[in-house]
Amino acid sequence: MKLEGFELRRVAMPLVSPFRTSFSTQTERDILLVRAVTDEGEGWGECVTLPDPLYSPEYADGAVDVMKRFFIPALAAAGVSDAPGVGHALYPYKGHRMAKAALEMAVLDAELRAEGRSFARELGSVHSSVPCGVSVGIMNSIPELLDAVGGYLDAGYVRIKLKIEPGWDIEAVRAVREKFGDDVLLQVDANTAYTLRDARHLARLDDFDLLLIEQPLEEEDILGHAELAKIVKTPICLDESITSAQTAAAAIRLGATQVINIKPGRVGGYLEARRIHDIAAANGIAVWCGGMLESGIGRAANVALASLPGFTLPGDVSASDRFYRTDITAPFVMKDGHLDVPAGPGLGVSPIQEVLDELTTSVEWVHI
Ligand code: OSB
Ligand code: MG
């Protein structure tokens, strides 16, 4: 397969409701799509950068810049012709894992489509459908939160994740437990909003039988999480801190993480995501698939990844309508709290050109 170039496309997708975390409020998703064009057909990648470097150091405009300035020229110079080749050619460049992941994903999709193989099969899928969890943003009031959670439970979501921050934690969790009972699979995500000085406070969450507490402390505070894990009974799950298979192995060894949220973008791609899955499995650590409010393109690949054997907890793998009234692909629709794993070639879904055109804010072509 010979790479001919990449199309970089920005798409503005309005969210069905604002999504508030401890670091920002989103009302629209500005998505960067990467289309790899080859002599054997095309492939799609989704770059999960947010507009500002508040979740990770990367941001959408920066991803476009690093792709055009360094990464695509490096792929051209190396004559890259397959997905593992993308990782090798970009290895000398530090960081920018979301940008690397999007390019690798597009090349992998092109390769698999040309060969008629699915992402799921390629990654090692063992399930034809995956259970759906939902990430619930910080709300203005407890009644508003209970309304939102009630709606998701009625829709069939099998696991609820509450975004928390100081001032929106114990009472939010208590209210959800009191209203919906002890059987709901419930977890929280702090997106680094606490410090080790909050350990006693966070230990109060132990009363609520949570599956886990996600990324309570700063991303670089691996030892802090290991200390916290000795004080808090609720399992600690790292998200932001896990940027590679190497950091995953270290965090596991240090006792900083009892569960891992795997986001392919954050770790540099689906191939590295699979390596983290393998390391976690070898250490008896459960993993689940995180999300970055993906369109149908990224969602398709996440659903495939979530169907690997070590993904033993429901992920932030929601139906398209959790975030978008209109998706750019055929929508992912939940049945019985599950999504079907696409089985067609590559991602198994493609953008619908008319929808894509309507939502596109810019397109540029970068030749190889
Ligand atoms: O921390 O998991 C997170 C979205 C953007 C940035 C960070 C996070 C999230 C989510 C959304 O929780 C999960 C989803 O896409 O369903
Ligand atoms: Mg998280």
Image: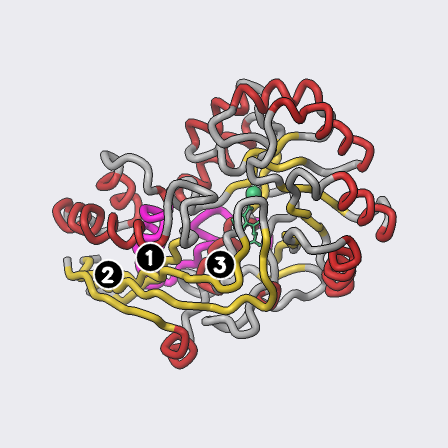
4 vs 152, left or right, is: left
Q: Say which quadrant the N terminus sits in.
A: bottom left
Quadrant location of the C terminus in the rendered image: bottom left
* Residue corresponding to mark 1: 106
Residue 304 seen anywhere in this rendered image of the structure? no
Q: Residue at x 52, y 31 (%)?
A: 218
Mark 3 sits near ligand 1, with its Cβ under 8 Å away: yes
Residue located 42% across and 62% down the image: 30
Q: Is residue 103 magenta?
A: yes
Residue 226 versus residue 252: which sits nearer the camera?
226
Residue nearer the viewer, 363 or 86 = 363
User: Cα distance, mark 1 to mark 3?
Assistant: 15 Å
| Amino acid at pointer 3 | Glu
Q: Secondary structure at mark 1?
A: helix
Q: Is residue 18 left or right of residue 122?
A: right
Question: Which of pointers 1 and 3 indicates the residue nearer the eye?
Answer: 3
Which residue occupies the foreground of this view, 101 or 200? Answer: 200
The amino acid sitting under disc 1 is: Ala
Give the CA separation, mark 3 to mark 2. 20 Å
Q: Mark 3 = which residue?
A: 294
Image location (x, y in percent) of residue 347:
43, 61
Give the percent coordinates (x, y) of residue 104. Answer: 32, 50
Q: Quadrant of residue 18?
A: bottom right
Q: Secondary structure at mark 2?
A: strand
Residue at horizontal 48 percent and vertical 33 percent from the top: 242
- Name the spot of residue 258 as percent of width and height, x first: 62, 28
Contact (Cβ within 8 Å) of mark 1 with mark 3: no
Q: Which residue is mark 2?
A: 6
